[in-house]
Image (cartoon, coloured by chain):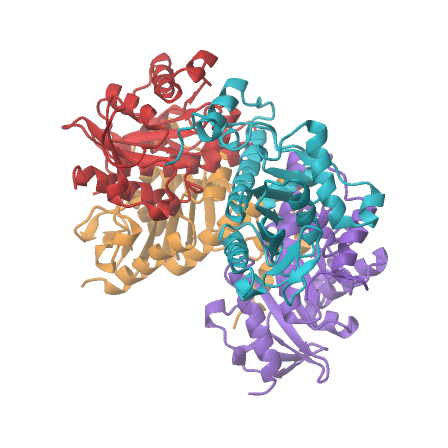
Chain colours: A red, B cyan, C purple, D orange
Amino acid sequence: MNFEDIRQQAYAANMQLPKLGLVLFTFGNVSAADRSRGVFAIKPSGVPYDELSPEKMVIVDFEGKIVDGNLRPSSDTLTHAVLYKYWTAIGGIVHTHSTYATAWAQAQHDIPIFGTTHADHCTVDIPCAPPMDDSMIRGNYEFETGFQIMNCFAERELNYKEVEMVLVGNHAPFTWGKDAAKAVYNSAVLETIAQMAMLTKQINPAAPRLKEALITKHFERKHGPDSYYGQ
Amino acid sequence: MNFEDIRQQAYAANMQLPKLGLVLFTFGNVSAADRSRGVFAIKPSGVPYDELSPEKMVIVDFEGKIVDGNLRPSSDTLTHAVLYKYWTAIGGIVHTHSTYATAWAQAQHDIPIFGTTHADHCTVDIPCAPPMDDSMIRGNYEFETGFQIMNCFAERELNYKEVEMVLVGNHAPFTWGKDAAKAVYNSAVLETIAQMAMLTKQINPAAPRLKEALITKHFERKHGPDSYYGQ
Amino acid sequence: MNFEDIRQQAYAANMQLPKLGLVLFTFGNVSAADRSRGVFAIKPSGVPYDELSPEKMVIVDFEGKIVDGNLRPSSDTLTHAVLYKYWTAIGGIVHTHSTYATAWAQAQHDIPIFGTTHADHCTVDIPCAPPMDDSMIRGNYEFETGFQIMNCFAERELNYKEVEMVLVGNHAPFTWGKDAAKAVYNSAVLETIAQMAMLTKQINPAAPRLKEALITKHFERKHGPDSYYGQ
Amino acid sequence: MNFEDIRQQAYAANMQLPKLGLVLFTFGNVSAADRSRGVFAIKPSGVPYDELSPEKMVIVDFEGKIVDGNLRPSSDTLTHAVLYKYWTAIGGIVHTHSTYATAWAQAQHDIPIFGTTHADHCTVDIPCAPPMDDSMIRGNYEFETGFQIMNCFAERELNYKEVEMVLVGNHAPFTWGKDAAKAVYNSAVLETIAQMAMLTKQINPAAPRLKEALITKHFERKHGPDSYYGQ
């Protein structure tokens, strides 16, 4: 089997989505990239998770062209391709319609940074990119979705290496990371943060954002040069 | 066993309801139709899911008359019969009291189309038919429930082939599709849409409906003539 | 083993509580009565569900006196005893702290009858008995809890054979039925009704109560003389 | 293996966290103390629960110095150490980011005592310690977190032997008890109380606190000198 390593990675990462409660039926997809060969492996479109196998993963290049595989790739493939092409440090991407993150996307609100669970993973509010212009929607939709995400990061001067998650307004979340496993981890974290933030607002509509010193402390202890979390 | 194929389909589809978390005890039923013979197989009334078997499914014609089977059919049988009789392209029907969809029905509100998860399956708000007149309730109640659903679609000029789900006000949801498996799929999708819409309103009471270009795009990519979702 | 039949019934019914998601740790208890001998079998106090067995059930009479068993009975035993003594058609009682029903009890609100799921089981709002007077609390508390429930039914002219569930204000729900299995069934139904009613109010704070014709229809089709639900 | 008993206790207690739904990934840790030797066993930092074993637990003294073990201890170790050092009756400590308790911490609200489920375990509102001063955050953060908790208890004149749980504002809950198993029990109870209180406020924003007589009665029947709960 060609591209066995990334097919295996993409397969294993896709299978985590139902296990983590992040997808209903086929509402999600994960890809895993091999930068040395300029390709990624992605879930085939509309195939139920319990019928997946590593060899069913489709190999696509960063222009969105199919390189290997018998099945049609995920309908979101071009969004993955654009992000891989321009954000050159990414090794894995996940798209889901997980319940709470999608509700924030539908509400067209950033997820405010309310606590250390959020700050452990990201120092800013989770950005919600605005819905696209009609011309972009009617054009090459999935391709433009990638640009919508990148434009949102550019306007807000966010670094995709530090903020590994985004909501696309009226749509749903995308997450990424150094590899597919990390991108899946980020999807589960995002869903939890989204639920906690929603509940926080229910309990106290005037809940303040986390203060700067705590944001810095928690992010640094996990990700800074002197981090002391993990082994 | 007579009608083995639709009995098996109805059995398999009914067994999906508890697995998908859509029913408590016996609060739901699925039927599967065979149009060539003008009959459908439906769950027997009040029998727990773990005591079901294909041969226990009851065979009923489109007038609601029992054709084969030893058990009493679901108390909602006449609603199924009416819908099969007049909506001639339907092959399966599901009724549940799934939590979030039922809450919207009890609130007597349509479910607004807030995002692409909804638009992937339906281009309009999920309609909530008004509660019936007292004379209809006191008359042939389950029979009239079918007409209440069809009248709601007629008044709003909705096509049952495009909108495969409805809430009956103060009661609960019904869904349908080309076969029983698709109708069950629609029940699970409806429950997810109902939960997301409720959360969206909690986060942002002024959340706008999805804009037209996105509604069209998402529905077309799954269901249009140039659809590119699935295999 | 003495009283083997009711010990077995009480054991089986108690084991349903964690399975149905109605209890955390030991926060609940079920009893099963044998009216011919004037006794009931009840869960021992504070024993984890996975350490229960039929022979550990304690046999108590309707005055609350222990008749057989080596363990101390549930701390709520006197409430069960009082209800068995005065409500002579009851064969099983359940007490839980299930999440949504307890939230309504804490809110000191009746659960409004918003839909047919509720009407299938009960034709009125689920009553919430007011918290007890301080003198009753400081006196024979669990004994008085039984009277608080019966007084609430007397004042509202409710029939315990038709309304098989109650919230005790600031505390939690009690349910009952012809036997322990039916009482457990009612506990699960109550929890679902409580969740749906809470969500209904979130979606539409002005949601109307179910109209009389639907209340009657749904209750009658399950419980009336011409009922046609079940086998 | 050295310290086999507390390593085993800490291991078993840590494994309860995912089982009880209190942690996502590695977002939590439990420790178990041996006061005769002045040490505690704690989860290693960032190790997934399904890769844990008793021998991986790290042994630390009450100053926070590692005594035995090959892995780095939890990043929250110093908070545990401080609490063990000053609250001399504690035998186990748990830290989680459980969803509802964390939402209350993020809302910076005490959890009001709304019902008997709460009073069975604690006679006061669950305290939410304020977020720390910036100088404490930038200093020895985890060490100061322990003092923040103790200061909160001192100011409110609470006794850590009676109130075995706290929310740290903007962060998450800590619980403790006579041993690690009791501390885990308290974490699950706290999460349930937090969810019920949030729902109570949704149903009735003006819900009153539990009255004094019920608070006393329920706490005393489980914990007073004449308690009659359990065996």
Nearer to the camera, A11 or C91? A11
Placement of A218 over or under C106, stated as above or below: above
Q: Position of residue B37 (x, y in %)?
A: 60, 53
Q: Quadrant of residue D147?
A: top left
Residue D63 can be seen, yes or no: yes
Q: Quadrant of residue C121?
A: bottom right
Placement of C27 over or under D152, stated as above or below: below
Residue B52 can be seen, yes or no: no
Q: Is residue B221 left or right of residue A58?
A: right
Q: Is residue A227 left or right of residue D150?
A: left
Q: Is residue B194 left or right of residue C90?
A: left
Q: Position of residue D110 (x, y in %)?
A: 54, 40
The tally of labels here is: 0
Nearer to the camera, A80 or C20? A80
Placement of D37 over or under A127, stated as above or below: below
Residue found at the very far bottom of the displayed protein: C1
Nearer to the camera, D69 or A126? A126
Q: Residue at x 32, y 28 (%)?
A: A77
Q: Residue at x 72, y 49 (%)?
A: C116
Placement of D218 over or under B156, stated as above or below: below
Residue found at the very far front of the displayed protein: B36
Q: Quadrant of the N terminus of chain D?
A: bottom left
Q: Position of residue D146 (x, y in %)?
A: 37, 42
Q: Residue at x 58, y 35 (%)?
A: B161
Q: Residue at x 51, y 62 (%)?
A: C19
Q: Position of residue A9 (x, y in %)?
A: 23, 40
Residue found at the very far left of the displayed protein: A36
